[in-house]
């Protein structure tokens, strides 16, 4: 097993007993998300509606050891940071399987929200308000020495009233160390900072020096998407977008944007990471911009929930969200636990 910043031993991240949950009080409902190494279910814990993330242990001893270390690290990070724009952790357990329980967010992913609005755009004040939520969440992580490394619309979830955005999925988060190198194979290429890859380091597992400024670049791409409601680097594959950003210094267009917002984007996605602002500065820049906008409160578009059968454009795998999707047709949604009595949840022990 790798040491240092790559993978930590489970012992280094022993779960505080106050975060341990008793699986006998867990009840599992429909599946609401799935990634490469985990599935997320809607559920109940002591009558509280929750999201239940169940991590696959892997098949080989090496894979199991890595997954256990990643699980322990994610739980440790989640339990250490609390903020209104971060998904609230309820607790975790590692027997009979590795489980992380968080608050259930019902507003859908930012990605689905934006897709359902197209070709319309968000009101600029709403877009910047959402960006401020995101910036404050990342600022909190950075203040605890944590880099998220996978900032993208799939990992940003709206609350039920769709007025607040929360950051989820710490599966790729790492603690920052100036003396260690970290794996370059992280995040999703379209939103990922150029310093995370090169013509040499596209091979899995290679190491590069980088720091928390990778999140500033990803934030800029997300902010551009919020303002335009278009896919960044449209017409390119994820790898083509990564190549263009890293080796041609390509960035999405800043045309037709207010000067202050263009300056924020341009500063956040600079090629030199040291020239990018930190998130405390980003928060202040966004607040200053909002203060220059005329007062009337924008109306956030009415609740927009996509059909569960809607096919989204293919992007990256990963635990995309901790959300509840509902099928109004009365059919059993894809991934729903079969033979489950309507309105009831299965006891966790019956499933695992």
Image (cartoon, grey):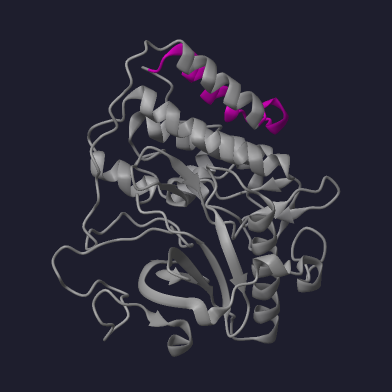
Q: Does the magenta stretch include residue 25?
A: no
Q: Residue furthest front?
A: 47
The front one of 274 and 139 is 139
Q: In this view, does 77 lie above or below 17?
A: above
The picture places residue 213, in percent across and down from the top left corner, at 67, 37
Q: Does 5 sit left or right of 248 as displayed?
A: right
Q: Residue furthest left?
A: 329
Q: Does the magenta stretch include residue 260?
A: yes
Q: In this view, does 51 lie above or below 112?
A: below
The picture places residue 93, in percent across and down from the top left corner, at 62, 75
Q: Residue furthest right?
A: 179
Q: Does 249 sit left or right of 32 as displayed?
A: right
The picture places residue 275, in percent across and down from the top left corner, at 69, 25
Q: Give the range drawn in magenta.
A: 257-278
Q: Does 52 sit left or right of 2 as displayed?
A: left
Q: Can residue 75 be seen in this view?
A: yes
Q: Does 78 sit left or right of 298 as displayed?
A: right
The front one of 169 and 3 is 169
Residue at (38% x, 58% y) in the render: 323
Q: For the N terminus, which image quadrant?
A: bottom right
Q: Specify the quadrant of the image occupied by residue 170.
A: bottom right
The picture places residue 201, in percent across and down from the top left corner, at 66, 54
């Amino acid at each position: 097993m790798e040491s240092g910043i790559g993978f930590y031993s489970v012992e280094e991240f022993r779960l505080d007993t106050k975060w341990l949950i008793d699986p006998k009080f867990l009840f599992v409902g429909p599946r609401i998300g799935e990634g490469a190494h985990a599935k997320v279910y809607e559920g109940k814990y002591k009558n509280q509606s929750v999201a239940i993330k169940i991590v696959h242990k892997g098949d080989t001893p090496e894979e199991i050891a890595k997954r256990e270390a990643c699980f322990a690290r994610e739980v440790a990070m989640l339990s250490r940071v609390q903020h209104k724009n971060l998904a609230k952790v309820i607790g975790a357990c590692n027997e009979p399987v590795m489980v992380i329980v968080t608050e259930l967010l019902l507003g859908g992913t930012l990605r689905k929200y934006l897709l359902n609005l197209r070709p319309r755009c968000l009101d600029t004040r709403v877009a910047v308000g959402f960006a401020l939520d995101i910036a404050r969440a990342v600022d909190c992580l950075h203040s605890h020495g944590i880099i998220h490394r996978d900032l993208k619309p799939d990992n940003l979830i709206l609350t039920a009233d769709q007025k607040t955005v929360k950051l989820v999925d710490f599966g790729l988060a790492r603690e920052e160390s100036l003396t260690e190198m970290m794996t370059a194979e992280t995040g999703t290429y379209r939103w990922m900072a150029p310093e995370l890859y090169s013509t040499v380091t596209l091979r899995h597992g290679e190491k590069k020096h980088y720091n928390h400024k990778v999140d500033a670049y990803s934030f800029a791409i997300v902010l551009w998407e919020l303002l335009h409601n278009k896919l960044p680097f449209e017409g390119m594959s994820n790898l083509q977008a990564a190549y263009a950003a890293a080796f041609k210094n390509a960035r999405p267009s800043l045309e037709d944007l207010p000067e202050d917002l263009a300056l924020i984007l341009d500063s956040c996605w600079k090629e030199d990471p040291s020239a990018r602002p930190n998130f405390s500065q980003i928060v202040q820049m966004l607040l200053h911009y909002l203060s220059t906008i005329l007062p009337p409160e924008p109306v956030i578009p009415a609740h927009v929930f996509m059909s569960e059968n809607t096919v989204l454009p293919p992007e990256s795998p990963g635990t995309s969200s901790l959300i509840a999707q509902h099928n109004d047709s009365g059919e059993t949604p894809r991934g729903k636990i079969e033979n489950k009595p309507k309105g009831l949840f299965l006891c966790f022990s019956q499933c695992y």
